[in-house]
Image (cartoon, grey):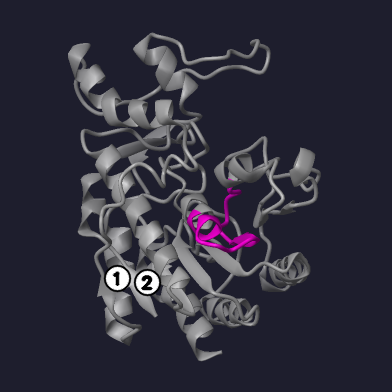
């Protein structure tokens, strides 16, 4: 299996985040990608390739041009306003506020408009890192389009919390959505996204919610208690033409392998019923029992089984790296999924 990876992910590193009322060192750090890459090389998974730059056009198939302009320019605006450090939003719209049709003009108002949390800041080179993560996803999609059975896009920063025009949850561009759209544009009439990250892929849901050509199935912590909150309920099934093509499996804190696998198998069957011709897996391994910001109880060997069951779809498959913050076990768990797939 080919792995696509760029050292440019180092261009993004938020030094800290706000977590449960405290300012802490960020959990989403550059060493995450390095640990996974080292494991890939240790087990001899396959060649590691540096993706080419793709430009904005395939990213604009998913994200709005005004949002991309904002990501590219906001750090310079922050500095021009006389501010030091990283770019942080600090206020968000409340449900009582009426909707607005266009971005506001003020810097802080636009930061509020284009974000939903304080999990990750924007540094001078965050936009470049996010663009290169998108390139990594696009290169993996192109490998699948060229006939590879599977590919792994080792993306960082991750992407599934980013929507068409907003960032949050460590995510700036939605790598899995960009890849799925690339597969659609490359000739696949129906693409499924299987999001097995612990946290709900709220951005992916927002992007495809009214579409019938891309099915999203997501297993995640119940939004009543787990980030990103407010979205990810089973009742959210899509809208308009997309009704029935958005499948959420919210699960309680403490969910173990038996309960998780039951939901996984149900989603597996629903994806089969959709009859996609290609599959994108949002590969988060923060379902691991020792993950510091998650509350499921999967163990290392379970990820081998997950990979084997994904292989059972017998579809061209792209794995896109999302979360996983138990750094000591991250490489083993992520690569276990890939090896389970390869061995099946």
Task: Please say if 43 is above or below 104.
Answer: below
Horizontally, is 213 left or right of 91 in the view?
right
Which of disc 2 and disc 1 is earlier in sequence? 1
What residue is shown with label 2?
A: 331
- Label 1 belongs to which residue? 37
Q: Is residue 297 magenta?
A: no
Region of the chain picked out in magenta, as a range = 182-201
Structural crowding at the residue carrying mark 2, measured as other residues with C-alpha within 10 Å and reported as few (<14), some (14–19) or many (≥20): many
- Where residue 236 sits in the image (x, y, percent)? 76, 43
Residue depicted at x 47% and y 37%: 63
**Residue 87 locus on image (x, y percent):** 30, 26
Q: Quick check: is 183 in the magenta stretch?
A: yes
Residue 283 visible somewhere in the drawing: no
Q: Say left or right for 268 vs 125.
A: right
Of 29 and 98, the residue lying toward us: 98
Q: Is residue 95 left or right of residue 299?
A: right
Q: Which residue is outermost to the front?
A: 187
Q: Secondary structure at mark 1?
A: helix
Q: Position of residue 228 (x, y in %)?
A: 58, 40
Q: Residues within 10 Å of mark 1 (few under 14, many from 20)?
A: some
Asked whether 73 or 26 is in front, the reply is 73
- Indicate the position of residue 107 as horizontal and vertical percent values: 35, 13
Q: Quadrant of residue 85?
A: top left
Q: Measure the C-alpha gap from mark 1 to mark 2.
A: 7 Å
Q: Name the mark nearer the viewer: 1 or 2.
A: 1
């Amino acid at each position: 299996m080919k792995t696509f990876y760029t050292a440019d992910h180092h261009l993004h590193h938020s030094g800290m985040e706000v977590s449960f009322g405290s300012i802490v060192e960020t959990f989403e750090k550059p060493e995450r990608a390095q640990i996974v890459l080292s494991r890939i090389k240790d087990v001899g998974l396959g060649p590691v390739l540096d993706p080419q730059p793709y430009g904005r056009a395939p990213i604009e198939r998913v994200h709005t041009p005004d949002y991309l302009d904002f990501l590219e320019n906001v750090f310079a605006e922050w500095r021009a306003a006389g501010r030091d450090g990283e770019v942080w939003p600090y206020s968000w719209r409340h449900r009582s506020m009426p909707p607005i049709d266009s971005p506001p003009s003020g810097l802080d108002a636009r930061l509020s408009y284009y974000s939903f949390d304080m999990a990750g800041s924007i540094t001078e080179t965050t936009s470049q890192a996010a663009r290169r993560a998108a390139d990594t996803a696009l290169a993996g999609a192109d490998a699948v389009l060229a006939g590879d059975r599977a590919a792994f896009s080792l993306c960082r920063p991750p992407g599934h919390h980013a929507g068409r025009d907003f960032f949050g949850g460590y995510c700036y561009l939605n790598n899995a959505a960009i890849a799925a759209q690339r597969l659609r544009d490359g000739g696949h009439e129906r693409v499924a996204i299987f999001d097995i990250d612990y946290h709900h892929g709220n951005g992916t849901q927002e992007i495809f919610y009214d579409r019938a050509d891309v099915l999203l199935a997501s297993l995640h912590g119940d939004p009543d208690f787990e980030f990103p909150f407010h979205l990810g309920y089973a009742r959210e099934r899509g809208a308009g033409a997309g009704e029935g093509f958005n499948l959420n499996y919210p699960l309680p804190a403490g969910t173990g392998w038996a309960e998780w696998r039951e939901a996984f198998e149900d989603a597996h069957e629903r994806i089969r019923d959709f009859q996609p011709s290609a599959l994108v897996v949002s590969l988060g391994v923060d379902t691991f029992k020792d993950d510091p910001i998650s509350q499921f109880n999967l163990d290392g060997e379970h990820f081998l089984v997950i990979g084997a069951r994904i292989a059972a779809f017998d579809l061209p498959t792209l794995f896109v790296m999302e979360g996983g913050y138990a750094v000591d076990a991250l490489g083993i768990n992520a690569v276990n999924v890939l090896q389970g797939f390869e061995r099946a």
